[in-house]
Image (spheres, helix red, strand yellow):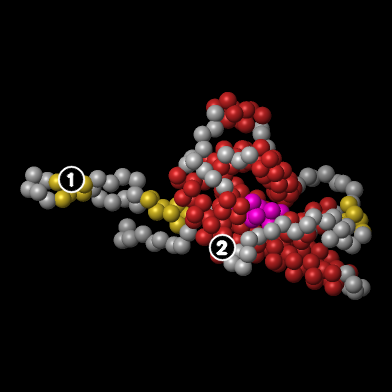
Amino acid sequence: MAGIYITRGMSVSIPHFSFRISESGEFEGDPITLHVRFDVCPTWIQIAKRHLDAALIAKANRNVAWQGTDEMAKAQALEVEFEASMQAIVAAAIAWDALYAVLREHVAIPPRILEKWRNGRTARYTQVAEVTRRAFSLTQKGASMLRGNLKNIYRYRDLAVHPSGKIEAPLLHPELNLGMEWRFIYFRAHNAELAVMAAATMLWDLAHNAKSKDEKISAYQKTLVERLKEIFPDSAPTVPVANSNA
């Protein structure tokens, strides 16, 4: 290759390098080989935030449409909000999958636990939470909160990726007070905001406040801090107060 293109957010390392002094007293070295890696965790949070912004706009448009009598406009407004909300939630879950991939390289999981995960088909959120707990030596309370939040995020992710094919009774839309398909209830802007901001807030907290005994994880935290500040330049992300009637 003529060269290597390095972008912002990419990690670069030199896995092997040595030099020696020849008999003539000159320095000799092996060719330098670079390894690169791009961390997609903050990228997916940025994507999630972008879709969340679209979902919140769609919610406002939906409110306007449902004040009128145009049924086509009402249906279209619901679809737009549904699509943006679903993509926002799925992207938030993928961000945590990406974090798991980074941490897993530096966290040793006992073979018996790995076997239990494989044989018991342990839920993805449980595995992600456990690796994160070990990476940062989280307290029992902190680990429990993390696991609970991830459980909710991955529940919605699973509904999007593996929806049921069953014909089911409609659910009550808490904002429109009308029975509808479950997708319009689960994948609406309110839930997307809860999921995305919870995912982002937990990442922000880990990056800024968590402590790791592993030097490589600590170094990763520093790069994650900078990436998250670019996505949330004004202030740290916060989770809105949950309200089923919002």
Q: Nearer the viewer, residue 69 or 145?
A: 145
**Secondary structure type for disc 2:** helix
Mark 1 lies on residue: 20
Amino acid bearing label 2: Lys
Which circle's residue, 2 or 1, is located before the other in the chain? 1
Name the residue at 61% across, 64% down: 232
Whole-Å distance between the Cαs marked 2 and 1? 43 Å
Name the residue at 79% across, 45% down: 165
Q: In the rendered image of this protein, does residue 141 appear above or below residue 196?
A: above
Q: Quadrant of the N terminus?
A: bottom left
Amino acid bearing label 1: Arg
Crowding around mark 1 (Cα neighbors within 10 Å: few <14, some 14 to 19, many 20+) is few
| Image quadrant assignment for residue 18 | top left
Q: Tell me where the magenta segment starts and ends, as one range.
A: 195-203
Q: Determine the main secondary structure of the stretch shown in magenta.
A: helix
Mark 2 lies on residue: 229
Q: Is residue 184 visible?
A: yes
| Image quadrant assignment for residue 122 | top right
